[in-house]
Image (spheres, rainbow, N blue to C red):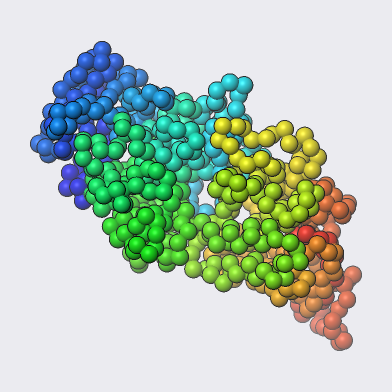
Amino acid sequence: MDLYGFYKGKILDAYEYLGCHTYFGGATFRTYAPNAQHVSVSGDFSNWEEVPMFRTSDNSIWECSIQGANPGMKYKYNIYLRNGSMVEHTDPYAFAMEPVPNAASIITDLYAHTWEDDEWMRKRGNCWNKPMNVYEIHMGSWKKPDEGLYTYKEIAKPLIDYVKEAGYNYIEIMPLGEHPCTNSWGYQQTGFYSPTSRYGTPEDLKYFIEYAHANDIGVILDFVPVHFAVDAYGLANYDGTPIYEYPSNDIGYNEWGSKNFNHCRGEVQSFLASCARYWLKEFHFDGLRMDALSNIIYWQGNSSRGVNRNAVEFIKHMNKSLKTMDLSIILIAEDSTTIDKVTDNPDYGGLGFDYKWDMGWMNDTLSYFQIHPYDRMRDYHKLTFSMMYYYNEHFMLPLSHDEVVHGKATILQKMNGDYDMKFPQARALYMYMYTHPGKKLTFMGNEFGQLREWDEEKEQDWFMLKYPIHDSFYQYIKKLNHLYLNNSALYERDYTQDGFQWVDCHREGERIYVYERRSSDQTILVLLNLSDAKQTYHLEHYNAQKLTMLLSSDNEIYSGSTRYDDTVVLSLDSASANSDEAAPEDAPKSGSFDIELNAFTGIMYLVE
């Protein structure tokens, strides 16, 4: 290991040296504890008797090699503090841990798996001009067996097959690093390099990812570089001093009750950057979604306290280094700040992410659909405002787990009005989302109109699909997903200004929106009537020979009110021409179309 780079926060391979590494017949243990009085390791290999470790020439890293220490055996470090006391710690760089509430590390052969996903790894990329439809899941509560939890390996086929059929091409998994408390959802971790044993072994997780790749499904991991759990066996006061956290409680603790990483220390930067690299390289994750970026950018996530410049430089260096090592990975920022250049190149002052969650779009959209249809005249431009700033960053549109918990209600429940009134509005909302520029992310259960808020202890309410209105809602989302994946106008020019054009965004009284999505070979016209009244929209002087309906959210088969027997086509032959004089045969045809829009309806047309 490059020790100078380790202390300067410039390396991404610290895990290849620190931690426990096997060799034929034994294992070598190394841990960074510069202020410890003494360190030993104990485990199954020694009948839990302590085996002394010795300072390396670096004087801050402790090391020993033990014959008979083999994969599958448990171990702990015994850190003797300068006051004479001793604290048992799990290995910060352990590749596996035993099931909670126990906290021993497990010796693991990091390189035992033979990967068979070369074809996927060669063709994957950042989806800049391709569709990216992300299904966010919590591994333990998508579905559950009669007892316990599915392992990574057991859930692979049912989950991946479902995702593929439903029209998603990526999965984002909430944090998988080992964590002591299930209801922390994985965001309060103790084992940053250890896939949680709740769902099986590291080998099981590799099987899951390989199965996903074999089915052309990418997998993104929710990564937590901001804070860690306070449990005594973890990183807190690891060697009797705060080497991972800030020494001052004023900035050492956060609103979640956990400890903030001290991003000003190079050793911490190397720990986190190496962790990011570890999940990408050793598990073949296709990308990372970085949690709570605002708490890295600003001290305590509070802009009034100023920018944490060391932390910002750490993110820039880590992202640039990750991309240098593998340009095909995807880096996503969960960022609620208004700081500039989150998705720009670090060489030009950016943070180096590929995408940023558009929290403004999410808040404005959900707020709009929560209010009475009459009041949408007043708030009409909540749905147009996003395009005023959209090209400032490379945005992803999220309807994530955060929007369906803690009394916020589920997405369907958020819709204004009674039960029956919610479904047509939710169908219109999702049409708006999937035809708006930007990559997509939605949380499990949203696709069939879950009514109960998400609970990490319970599986999704799959029984709701027995009810026709929920089944038809799922069928609608499925159709919308596949239209998104298979129509280039909906994704090819997400981040160029010729990919989107307002046709009519000043129908405040009618609450009607009309816009186009465009690609190199396709144009799609979208009309939304978000009022509670049926209306006829007169599309005048529109350069089209015909409009072929791709989808109506009001179709009877989706529990709407209109029956469409076959594909609906509006053509100039059946529309009124606006010119008094005959146009040349080779001139573009321009006409007017009268389009019936029922209440809370979205319609997509292919323009020909």
Q: Which quadrant holds residue 568?
A: bottom right
Which residue is outermost to the top? 47
Q: Is residue 463 left or right of residue 153?
A: right
Query: Looking at the image, which is closer to me, 352 or 581?
Result: 352
Image: 366 above or below 231: below
Query: Is residue 547 toward the left or the right of residue 501 in the image?
Result: right
Residue in the foreground of this view, choosing between 385 and 416: 416
The answer to whether 166 is drawn above or below residue 140 in the figure is: below
Task: Name the residue at the left extreme.
Answer: 57
Could one spot residue 607 in this view of the protein?
Answer: no
The answer to whether 421 appears left or right of 51 in the picture is right
Res. 362 in view = yes
Residue 95 occupies quadrant: top left
Looking at the figure, which quarter contains the N terminus?
top left
**Residue 10 at x, y percent in the picture:** 25, 50
Query: Which residue sits at x=16%, y=38%?
Result: 34
Residue drawn at x 53%, y 59% as measured from the top left: 358
Compared to residue 347, the image places residue 112 above or below, namely above
Q: Quadrant of the C terminus?
A: bottom right
Q: Position of residue 155 (x, y in %)?
A: 56, 29
Residue 306, by quadrant, is bottom left
Name the spot of residue 336 as percent of width and height, x first. 48, 59
Q: Position of residue 443 (x, y in %)?
A: 59, 45
Residue drawn where x is 54% and y is 67% of the image: 390
**Residue at the image position 28 percent from the left and 29 percent from the top:** 89
